[in-house]
Amino acid sequence: MDQKHYVVVKLKELAHELDRVPMISDFQAIFPRIPVSLLFGTWDNALRAAGLVTEEKEELKKKDPFPPIDDPEKIREVIQSKEMRNVVRLNHAEKIMVIGDMHLPFVNQNALSMVYAFAYKEQPDVIVQVGDLFDQYSASKFARSLNVYTPKAEDELAHQMAVEFWEKLAELVPNAKRFQLMGNHDARILKRIVEKFPEGEHLIEQAMRQRMTFNGVHTIHDPTEELFINGILFTHGHYSKLGAHRDYNQCNVVCGHSHRGGVNYRSYNGETFWELNAGFIGDPYSKALSYRPQRIHNWTTGIGLIDEYGPRFISF
């Protein structure tokens, strides 16, 4: 296969896996030796060759993702209009603890212990896990080892750990409201089924709802659905750049997905908007998360917290 054609094929597969147009860092993390710039000249040219950049998207790129709004009241209207999409709205949570990507069963056990200790000490009003609770390594579309777990063993172990995770938090923080979001890894099995057996989609959806439902936890089963708490949008996320979800939604946002925790602020017309990424507590050296080109990485282990002093990322 011609190398340029190979890149085009892999770009389309990667876009399908990520549910978005891939960035060059996404591609190079999996194919570090392929000289995309030499083959296509620019990354945008490679995306065009794969049919991932349309004229409409090109026009959108030229626009400010945070368009100017002169009237502060208009900003509030925009935020309120987006709140109409929510599943649950809480307005009086004083302290919110946010747990990022866990990738069960490939979790960092030391980090998980820190999560429990922190939850017990802080006694948050709300606990949110922002998705990628499960890794679904066996359902990955990319090259994977068969010497880790069988699909059945991985699924059973991950589900057992998830049940124990929520039961432990209920024991440590009995008064907290608990929420579970869906991430792109959580939906991997459904994607594989739809690819091979679309007639069985409704059956797998039902099974996935059951395994993502936990006692005393409100699960948002649609990965495209948002949760709003105190006017803050909670989503798993799909952008890699910190602040991109805030700019897109034009409100305060909490997310995960990139495994890089932090807070980014942006002031506009006298108001300050922020994005909090909750990082992750997966094991970066596990086989399932070893798709990086080297062992050194820029992922950050920790959790997010929002209280009367605002949002912050707490690194472990």
Image (cartoon, rainbow, N blue to C red):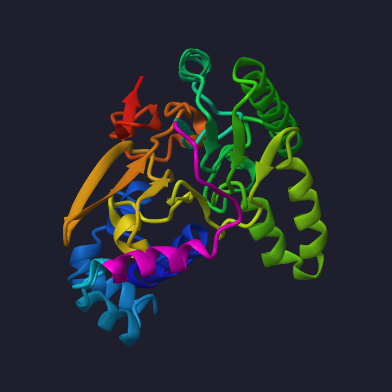
> How many numbered marks does the figure carry?
0
Task: Identify which residue is drawn at 47% across, 26% down.
Answer: 283
Residue 134 is at least partly visible in this image: no
Task: Identify which residue is drawn at 75% across, 33% down.
Answer: 215
* In the displayed structure image, the side of residue 216 where residue 1 appears, left or right: left
At which x and y percent is residue 21? 39, 66
- Which one is nearer the viewer's eye here, 29 or 90? 90
At which x and y percent is residue 132? 54, 42
- Which one is nearer the viewer's eye here, 68 or 247? 68
Q: Is residue 153 on the magenta stretch?
A: no
- Which one is nearer the viewer's eye here, 167 or 239? 167
Residue 229 is at least partly visible in this image: yes
Using the rendered view, name the quadrant where residue 144 is placed.
top right
- Which one is nearer the viewer's eye here, 43 or 129? 129
* In the displayed structure image, the side of residue 234 where residue 199 appears, left or right: right
At which x and y percent is residue 108? 49, 22
User: What residue range appears in magenta?
Assistant: 73-94
